[in-house]
Amino acid sequence: MGASYKLKLLKPLCPPYQYAVEATNYCNFRCSFCPQSDPEHRGRRQSGFLTLEDFQLYLQRIKAEKPGNINLSICLDGEPLMNKQFPEFIRLAHEQGFFPRFSSNGRLITPETADRLAQAGGFLASIDFSPDPAIFETIRGKPGDFKVVLDNLQHLVRLAQSNPRVQLEIVDISGFTGCDPKLSLHKMRDLFPPELPANIAFWNRIFHNFAGHLTHEIKKTKYTLCPYPWSTMSVTWEGDVVACCRDTAARTRLGNVFQKPIREIWLGDKFTAMRRDLVEGRPDKIAACKNCDMPWSGDTAPDRWRLSNIISTLLRR
């Protein structure tokens, strides 16, 4: 993966390193920083749920490529726990030799659900939160959601303390409002026990514009080649391979993994043409990339582009 990206090969030498599939694009929240808050977002593509049969097919497609990474993200757009089959996805992923991870708003991970997911084999859950109820219920949830999510998180922490197969990332989103991220993270950490094992992590969310959803100004001064088309394959619930994990509206569709093998799509004309446009500095030619801030963050977030950081990010996904 690294060599193909560094050499800017239009047809990578290796299959994708990281795979993701969407459990559903329905969501129970309308977070300010997420495309789900856009009234027009739902109309950009069909809404639905990943089936067990299609999930099993995707796992077989991945295994045929002999993946070098056992992590599997079961999320893209939407809240994955809204799919009633989600615990079965966790079980099947483990059965096929993968370790599942997902992002969630935490509202539906009740203690009973968390225990069921742990019994299915374990998981990594990344949950955005804020220690300030007013911030959380303004940019994230509705009145009353703060306590529900906090209670769910506190149970998840206890579960992870006793079960190393349960990994938890609690991510502070308060910085979206302009507050001091270090102070806010300290306040959030105080909501939980002082001594916690290494499988429980806390960090601050650094926001991107979700391929144009947020309209903050992009200073196009230093172009950097995006690594995602050389490293990841993100798939919607209906099987469409999209440009990357930020393309939640499926603006750029590169093939359907329920209809064709992964390698055929990965090395196909559409993926190759997208990589060519990015290599030649033309992200504006790609529907999913033209308003994305990622290629232009070399000046504002230079550490993001170190190869070591790219690799560690992929390993964490």
Image (cartoon, rainbow, N blue to C red):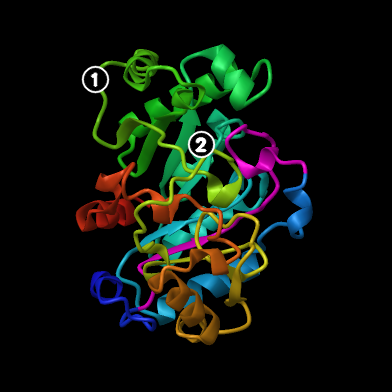
Question: Which kind of residue does numbered mark 2 sit on?
Answer: Ala
State the extent of the magenta-drawn residues as a range. Answer: 15-39
Mark 2 and mark 1: Cα distance apart in space? 21 Å
- Residue 118 in view, yes or no: yes
The picture places residue 19, in percent across and down from the top left corner, at: 44, 64
**Residue holding disc 2:** 114
Considering the image in quadrants, where does the N terminus appear? bottom left
In the foreground, 213 or 254: 213
**Residue holding disc 1:** 195
Callout 1: 10 Å neighbours few (<14), some, many (20+)? few
Quarter residue 300 falls in = top left
- Residue 47 in view, yes or no: no
The picture places residue 144, in percent across and down from the top left corner, at: 66, 16
Q: Secondary structure at mark 2?
A: helix
In the foreground, 209 or 32: 209
At x 57% / y 57%, what residue is drawn?
247
